[in-house]
Amino acid sequence: PKRNDRKEDKSIVMTLRMDRELQERFDVLAAKSDRSRNELMCMALKYALEHLEFIDSDKENIDS
């Protein structure tokens, strides 16, 4: 039975498809850094979200 007094987990499990070459690069980095592939991928995703910028397509058309 599920316990109601337990705090909600902050992590989830998801499935992700990627090129094998990218997965192999994460494996190499994981071995070099003594971190798990999962930890490195989470770090990379957080970095991408913090630095991702989208260009508004309407603004791009006006500037052209």
Image (cartoon, grey):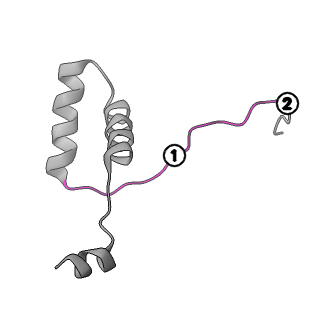
* Position of the C terminus by quadrant: bottom left
Q: Give the percent coordinates (x, y) of residue 26.
A: 22, 37
Which residue is most to the top?
34
Q: Is residue 12 left or right of residue 2?
A: left
In the picture of the structure, the residue carrying the numbered disc 2 is: 5
Decide which of 9, 20 is in the foreground and name it: 9
Q: Which mark is residue 22?
A: none
Check contact, mark 1 vs mark 2: CB within 8 A: no
Crowdedness of circle 2 by 10 Å Cα count: few (<14), some, many (20+)? Answer: few
Q: Secondary structure at mark 2?
A: loop
Which residue is pictured at 30% across the width and 75% down the height? Answer: 59
Among all residues in the image, which is located at the extreme front?
63
Where on the picture, by quarter, is residue 34? Answer: top left
Q: Position of residue 32 (x, y in %)?
A: 17, 21
What amino acid is found at the position of numbered circle 2 in the picture? Answer: Asp
Q: Quadrant of residue 47?
A: top left
> Which residues lie in the magenta part?
5-19
Spot occupied by residue 21 in the image (x, y as percentages of width and height) = 14, 49
